[in-house]
Amino acid sequence: MAHNNQEIEIKIPVNEQTFAKVKEKLIGIAKFVKITKQKDEYFTPVHRNFVEPEYPFEWLSIRERGNKYILNYKHFYPENVETATHCDELESEISNPQSLQKLLFALNIKNLVTVEKERETYLYNDEFEIALDKVNELGHFIEIETIKDFGSVELAREKLFNFAKSLDIDTSNPDKRGYPYLLLEKKSSLKKE
């Protein structure tokens, strides 16, 4: 959920025990929103492969959310760095995902990977959206995103990390590349570092 087309979030891989403990804490302090099954198909132009840079900074996907389909584009900043601070997120709901896929293929935009997950969502004090994700083939993750304008990217990231620490989440090893990259890497479609 981008705020003014800008997304500021952190995503942290956790073990099942930490996942359960954080969920228990959230039940006591945050508002439960919903549990959803989500499917995201990622694409890349052949002429400008999004996963070619060492640190990919663009993603294009068709998101399936129940009976709703969304075309989503993310551009992370700064570009070509290991740790992005935020991204532009542009979305448009689509009524016919099959036709859009045909259009993408006609434009020489190929399918990269499909990410499937179960997401449990909570809201905390109109400041953060917390997602507890069980990602097929990758495991458990906790994603915390700002839903309030904190005035700057730097301050928002500081607030995100402080909130994560208040939930007893070890923030020393956040995911820096995203589910599509991790899945491609696991399936050996990318070179290991």
Image: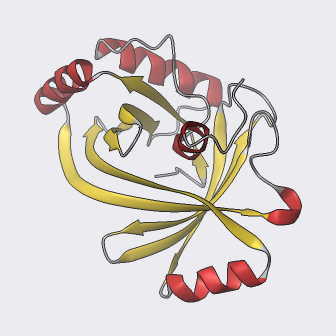
Residue 127 visible (yes or no): no
Question: Which residue is nearer to you in this view: 173 or 168?
Answer: 173
Q: Where is residue 1 in the image (x, y as percent from the top left)?
A: 46, 52
Residue sitting farthest toward the front? 188
Image: 86 above or below 118: above
Total marks in image: 0
Looking at the image, the residue that sits furthest to the right is 47
- In the rendered view, how is the structure colored? secondary structure
Residue 141's x, y, as percent? 37, 32
Q: Say which quadrant the C terminus sits in.
A: top right
Which residue is located at x 51 percent, y 22 percent? 174
Quarter location, residue 168: top left
Q: Identify the residue at horizontal 20%, vertical 34% (top origin).
A: 30
Q: In this view, does 27 lie to the left or right of 155?
A: left
**Residue at coordinates 38% horizontally, 75% vertically from top-left?**
68
Where's residue 2, x and y in %? 52, 51
Residue 132 as seen in the image, left or right of residue 39: left
Could you tell me which residue is drawn at 21 percent across and 19 percent down? 17
Q: Is residue 117 shown to the viewer in this render?
A: yes
Q: In the rendered view, does 18 fall on the left or right side of 50? A: left
